Image (spheres, rainbow, N blue to C red):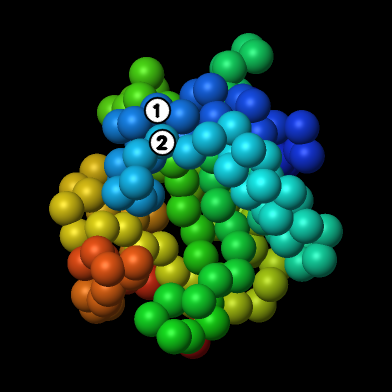
Amino acid sequence: MEIRTLLATDGPAIHRSLLGDPAIAAWLRSSGPFTLAECEEMVTKKVAHRATHGFGWSLGWEGDTCVGWAVAQYCIVDGLSEVEIGWTVARSHWRRGVATRLGRHALTEIADLDLRSVVAYTRVDNVASRGVMAKLGMTCEKRFNHHGEPHVLYRKTLRA
């Protein structure tokens, strides 16, 4: 798998391989798959984040197929500003170590930021994602509600 920076033209690939898939979209929202227009809008925002902050989303590719993304971004979690890492993997690549590799890539994105810690979060019932968080050396800190769903927040201390 090759991992490269998200490009402004990547909306269709994300829609085709990730967010257009009902099984993947269900982990992110209850209203069903994302439209192509929603994916393109998301890509525009994520490309702007990288331009502003110097770090951001990357995509994993096998040939010309997008197999996942690695998230490194500022976000608000439970009312607090945090730097978040995350991942989403195409269903065809579940349980193959892709999420862990994308998570490690996200950690490299923020390595030079001199952060005290980084967070990742997921729904309480996302056992696979919680396992990746543990593999990355993150520990469960708390439960919280995100968009009306119970989530868990994991944190990795980067410096004391």
Q: Would you name the residue on which mark 1 appears?
A: 21
Dividing the picture into quadrants, the one containing residue 6 is top right
Residue at 54 percent of width and 39 percent of height: 69
Q: Would you name the residue on which mark 2 appears?
A: 33
Secondary structure found at label 1: loop
Closer to the camera: disc 2 or disc 1?
A: 2
Secondary structure found at label 2: loop
Residue 69 seen in this snapshot:
yes
x and y percentages locating residue 134 in the rendered image: 28, 56
Residue at 44 percent of width and 69 percent of height: 119
Name the amino acid type tagged 1: Asp
Residue at 31 percent of width and 58 percent of height: 122
x and y percentages locating residue 154 in the rendered image: 33, 68
Is residue 137 depicted above or below 69 in this figure? below
Quadrant of the image containing the N terminus: top right
Say few, some or many: other residues with alpha carbon within 10 Å of mark 1 (under 14 / 14 to 19 / 20 or more): some
Q: Is residue 119 left or right of residue 56?
A: left
Q: Would you say the residues marked 2 and 1 are in contact, meaning their CB atoms lie under 8 Å apart?
A: yes
Which one is in front, 75 or 83? Answer: 75
Name the amino acid type tagged 2: Pro
Say few, some or many: other residues with alpha carbon within 10 Å of mark 2 (under 14 / 14 to 19 / 20 or more): some
